[in-house]
């Protein structure tokens, strides 16, 4: 239910809260018994599958991750009118087209950048961190199974590339064709970068 809610037409604040809630539910921090850890690990594996299904990170738009066969359509992240209207005011420039099909990358580039902080992006980074800590990176993620189309390149690589190629270069100002993302405060910038690096270090 929460994964379905995460792609509903929500503001960045609410979407970020939903993603952070899922991350908390899948967290293995604290003194947990072995049985509890195994249960969370099992739920985290399912969490990876659901994250792949909802395409918050638009993995299937990238050529190297296209499906092995055409077939099922994945759900797409939806944005409220307030988010869509803000993309048309021309307040900031982005290297990415203002097209909602780009999911959370669209939201970071065209919606959250107007706010100067990034609750949805941070929520997804928190979720990725919880998933990696709970069960690692499944090498079969996105694989074709039970007649369901899969990706040519299964695994977690696209989620790492999302951080390395989309989040960090824009947050640090090292993107080759786009300026640094605007931040309301230095704390907002440091927090986003710290969350991104935490996933890579996990």
Image: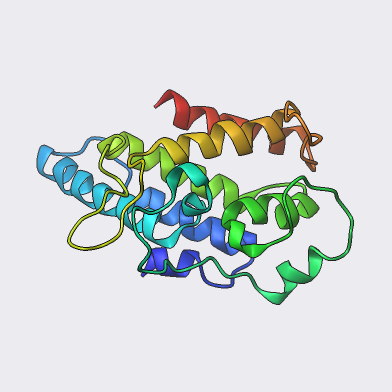
Name the spot of residue 58 as percent of width and height, x first: 52, 53
Seen in the picture, residue 90 relative to 180 is either above or below; the reply is below
Seen in the picture, residue 25 relative to 186 is either above or below; the reply is below
**Quarter containing the N terminus:** bottom left
Seen in the picture, residue 12 relative to 84 is either above or below; the reply is above
Along the line of sight, the residue nearer the viewer: 170 or 189:
170
Along the line of sight, the residue nearer the viewer: 160 or 172:
160
Extreme left residue here? 35
Name the spot of residue 143 as percent of width and height, x first: 27, 48
Please give the name of the residue rendered at 34% of the width and 59% of the height, measured from the top-left corner. 69
Q: Quadrant of residue 97?
A: bottom right
Please give the name of the residue rendered at 39% of the width and 27% of the height, measured from the top-left corner. 202
Seen in the picture, residue 110 relative to 202 is either above or below; the reply is below
Q: Quadrant of residue 12?
A: bottom right
Please give the name of the residue rendered at 80% of the width and 54% of the height, measured from the top-left corner. 114
Please give the name of the residue rendered at 27% of the width and 37% of the height, measured from the top-left corner. 139
Along the line of sight, the residue nearer the viewer: 166 or 132:
166
């Amino acid at each position: 239910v929460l994964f379905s809610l995460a792609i509903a037409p929500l503001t960045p604040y609410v979407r970020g809260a939903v993603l952070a809630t899922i991350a908390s539910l899948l967290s293995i921090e604290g003194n947990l018994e072995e049985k509890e850890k195994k249960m969370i690990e099992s739920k985290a594996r399912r969490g990876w599958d659901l994250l792949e299904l909802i395409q918050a990170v638009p993995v299937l738009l990238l050529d190297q991750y296209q499906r092995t066969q055409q077939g099922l359509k994945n759900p797409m992240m939806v944005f409220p009118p307030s988010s869509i209207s803000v993309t048309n005011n021309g307040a900031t420039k982005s290297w990415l087209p203002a097209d909602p099909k780009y999911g959370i990358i669209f939201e970071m580039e065209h919606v959250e950048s107007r706010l100067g902080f990034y609750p949805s992006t941070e929520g997804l980074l928190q979720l990725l961190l919880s998933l990696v800590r709970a069960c690692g990176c499944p090498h079969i993620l996105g694989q074709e199974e039970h007649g369901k189309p899969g990706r040519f390149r299964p695994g977690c690589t696209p989620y790492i590339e999302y951080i390395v190629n989309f989040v960090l270069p824009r947050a640090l100002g090292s993107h080759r064709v786009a300026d640094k993302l605007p931040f309301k405060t230095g704390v907002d910038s440091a927090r986003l970068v710290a969350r991104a690096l935490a996933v890579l270090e996990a």
